[in-house]
Amino acid sequence: MAKGWSLGLAALLAPVTLWLGLFFLVPLLFIVAYSFGTSGAYGGITLGFNPGNYLLVFDPLYLEIIVRSFGIAALTTLLCFLLGYPLAYFIVFKGRRWRNALILLVMVPFWTSLLIRAYAWVVILGGNGIANKSLQFLGITDGPVDLIFTPEAVLLGMTYSYLPFMVLPLYAALEKFDVRLKEAGKDLGASRWQTFLRVTFPLSLPGVIAGSILVFIPSSGEFVIPDLLGGSRTVMTGNLIQNQFLQSRDWAFGSALSVILGVLLLVAIMFYIRRVGTDKLEGA
Amino acid sequence: MAATSKGSRKGTMNGLPDWGLLLGSVLVYLFLYAPIAVLILFSFNSTRSTQVWSGFSFEWYGQLLADPTILQAFRTSLTVGVIATLIATVIGTMTALALSRHRFRGQSVADTAIYAATVMPEIVVGVSLLVFFVAVRIDLGITTIVIAHVAFTISFVTIVVRARLAGMDRSVEEAAQDLGASPVQTFFRVTLPLILPGVMAGGLLAFTLSFDDFVITYFISGVGSSTLPLKIYSMIKFGVSPVINALSTVVLVATLFLIFGGSRLLVRKDNT
């Protein structure tokens, strides 16, 4: 392990510093600067110190969208946890020789395009879609009902899309688990539930936290799924930002929204890294 | 390992709760795969409907091949993916070497920066790059797409390669240096061959991320250049059609081939 700075180390780190500095950090500083600017009538921007863009966030119209976005992201995280934990538990402890195949089945959707998976739900939930047909067939509804373009459709689409992001870190955490601890719990007279709550679950907590972050962050900034499944009735922060940049061309307000989203999520991450450490994240 | 199988066999003998767990897991797998199955099924439908099955046909695949804009988008995605992957893999591997083979002041800052780049919401990365490119007057197009894709994939390559470096036996490297090899010789003759599976896995991840990226590309692609995900998005916005199902099926199958081919390659490399 080489200690301290050397020419070789500087050479190894130069490309990443340049690339991420120029094309990740500097652009972020640009939107911080823009967020304090004033948008002109024709899409131009005057830099300065104008806190008005941040104050605009507290307009009830926008505040409602932002709060709802975090609400939907939190619900998505909860649903992914409720569906994902039993699945990860099943794969690790009951999967036996199919364990690798079962986890691979979770990884395949993880690798496939999010856009395509959202489209699948556009088709299913659409006016004459299979979901509507099934509801009518079962006699629950008389005619086509609005399934798509609802908050529930967005929640469903997001849970579907981000479920693998929850299962994989949970699997990684549970896989490292020493089964003898469970047996020890049992030998000491603990019931299955007691063993689970006192031993298994606490030891899998890093996986739960990593999975929750991996689901919560993309969910709260999500733009494609509410765009395709939420329509104009379920606008999220991501759609609001997109709108400021590509339609209303209020780049200053759009920048302020992006800064708020980025800062809130980075604070969450810092908090996590302080508590659990990056090595656990890597395990995910 | 023996403990694991013994533990699970014991578990299944406990009866009912395990059946609940099994049933729940089967339902979650159904939830994950049924929409994709429906999507693929209707790409072979003989009528324009993506809902009512009328019979088998390859019609929509024919239309897919006949559409020059789709082929053009595919070419753009492939070009961007290959160039961005090559650059990101080289830079990411260098970064991983620096972070795992050296202890230096500012290392935790570097670590945090690498992770920050992976967790920053895509939309924030997308709009900040848009603002930046417009401000410094770089024309939006293939160049800006490649720059952006390299920027968001470097960290992923770094993380994957670093994991491989962490699991590597360092004594071989030390032996090479004791025998008089220079650090550069040691890297190309000893270290690189040993971490190659990790480097290739990192590259594969970078390519898939680049090929599938929609959000960041959406903001910085400009008018002229459309990647495959952008093309799919505009088709969905235009209306549901079995052609999108056919295109999606092709992309899904291609991704699967890439991953399974890649992972088999990696497994073989691992064993030698």
Image (spheres, grey):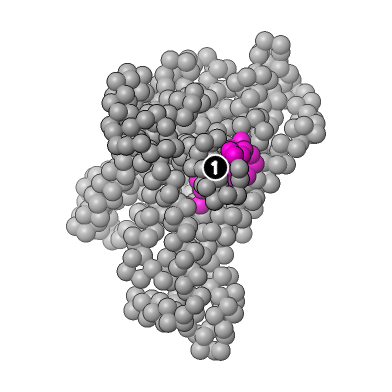
Q: Residues within 10 Å of mark 1 (few under 14, many from 20)?
A: many
| Image side of residue A171 versus residue A227, left or right | left
| Image side of residue A205 versus residue B199, left or right | right
Residue A272 point in image, percent of width and height: 61, 54
Residue B102 point in image, percent of width and height: 42, 51
* Number of residue marks: 1
Residue A43 point in image, percent of width and height: 66, 14
**What residue is drawn where x is 66% and y is 19%?**
A248
Magenta segment, prevailing SS (helix, strand or loop):
helix
Q: Based on the picture, tell me whether residue B83 belongs to the magenta stretch.
A: no
Residue A182 point in image, percent of width and height: 49, 79
For residue A43, above or below residue B111: above
**What residue is drawn where x is 49% and y is 34%?**
A20
The magenta stretch is A143-164
**What residue is drawn where x is 28% and y is 33%?**
B57
Where, quadrant-wise, is the N terminus of chain A in this rendering?
Answer: bottom left
| Image side of residue A241 versus residue B98, left or right | right
**What residue is drawn where x is 39% and y is 59%?**
A103
Which residue matches tag 1? A132
Query: Looking at the image, which residue sits at the far top?
Result: A42
Q: Is residue B76 visible?
A: no
Callout 1 secondary element: helix
The chain ID associated with circle 1 is A
- Is A26 or B121 nearer to us in this picture? B121
For residue A34, above or below residue B100: above
